[in-house]
Image (cartoon, rainbow, N blue to C red):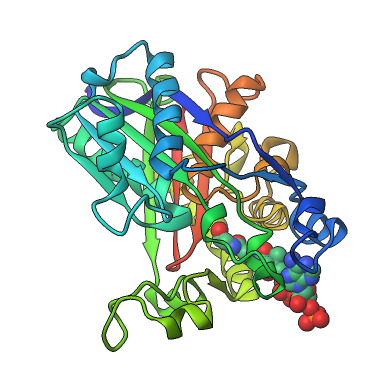
Amino acid sequence: MTNLRSRVIGLGSHLPPRIVTNEDLTEFMDTSDEWIVQRTGIRERRWVEGVTSTSDLAVEASQRALDSAGLAAQDLDMIFLATLSPDHFFPGSAVFLQRKLGLAGIPAIDVRQQCTGFIYALSIADQYIRTGSAEKILVVGSEVHSKGLEKSTRGRDVTVLFGDGAGAVILEATGVTDPDRESHLLSTHLYTDGAFAEELWVPAVSTAYDEDIVDQRMLDRGDQYPKMNGRQVFVHAVKRMPEAVEAALEQNNYQVNDVDLFVFHQANLRINEAVAHRLGAPEEKVFNTIHKYANTTAATIPIGLDEAVQAGMLEAGMLVASAAFGSGFTWGSALLRW
Ligand code: UT7
């Protein structure tokens, strides 16, 4: 029997050219290259310059994905853009991405699931393809963190972790008869636990306070900057990511050993080492980019896929497991036959 499934036919990423090293950060906060490398594995990250926005990075990655698929933007049926750093409070950034791609008419939808945003967007897009509602969908993760970070010692625990970047895939509907061989997205698993919403969040701008969505008191408190309980996030991430991968493997009757490459979210090298250890996966099968790009949130997974292909580590026919964890808390996994 032929089942309608999604398959990745295009892939692209874009990192802004400006490199910010750990040493560069010491110019405006009390931190050190040694602390950042030891605790996170991060050596440098990219920061945008000037007026560059999240949708600007997204359009570059999208165009590369379209080029690699041999498609024009006009061939797309839908757009999903995952981001926690939108161009504006509203409308969503997918609207600006659509306009910059020279398109009108097709649905352009923002997904706001932070570090798990790309897996959520992939999952939603996959449902449209499985039901035959769409044939070609652009799924993008894009972030400009640098403009929203507190660049002083007060914000150092968060600021050193994040970078800017974008990654994109094009999904196409495909009929799958042999799931062990043919390229397709096997499954996605999504989870949320809002009990932990304030463990990693940006308190303002906000409709949850008395009157205005932003006032001087919020700015004085620094509510516009991300706040994180790093320990809490770490402890949950190393538990939830392996669970999500195991759920994917179990549903599809595979073992950890069957996976050829793990392309995890990039929050902390120590998190990914612990996840691999808990799964019993060899570290050489885990593809990381955190040392050079830090955490680009919704963009880490498509950037990782793109770089793994460029590095010759991801080839047709491989089984790829992906998982992410972050603010919400949200977490999830995706299993793909590449
Ligand atoms: O996508 C999801 C996003 N976030 C995450 O996944 C983050 C998960 N958490 C982590 O990666 C880790 O918890 C961190 C890397 C954020 C922190 O590592 P840690 O080993 O948990 O350190 P800590 O928060 O317990 O802080 C240890 C010390 C503290 O000083 P004292 O109290 O021991 O004197 C901090 O003030 O390190 C200090 N510190 C820093 N020192 C230099 C915190 N940030 C910095 C910094 N540079 N940037």
Front residue of 265 and 293: 293
Seen at 30% across and 20% down, the residue is 177
* Residue 243 seen in render: no
Front residue of 133 and 248: 133
Q: Position of residue 72 (x, y in %)?
A: 29, 15
215 left or right, relative to 143: left
Seen at 42% across and 56% down, the residue is 84
Residue 259: quadrant of the picture: top right
Image quadrant, ligand 1: bottom right
Q: Quadrant of the N terminus?
A: top left
Residue 191: quadrant of the picture: bottom left
Seen at 40% across and 50% down, the residue is 83
**Count of numbered circles on the image:** 0
Which residue is farthest bottom? Answer: 210
Seen at 65% across and 42% down, the residue is 293
Task: Indicate whether 276 appears above or below 132.
Answer: below
Q: Position of residue 163 (x, y in %)?
A: 60, 49
19 left or right, relative to 98: right
Task: Indicate whether 165 appears above or below 297.
Answer: above
Which residue is farthest right? Answer: 34
Residue 76: quadrant of the picture: top left
Task: Indicate whether 159 appears above or below 5.
Answer: below
Which residue is farthest top? Answer: 70
Q: Position of residue 115 (x, y in %)?
A: 48, 55
10 left or right, relative to 262: left
* Residue 100 seen in render: yes
Q: Position of residue 93 (x, y in %)?
A: 31, 46
Task: Indicate whether 293 appears above or below 179.
Answer: below
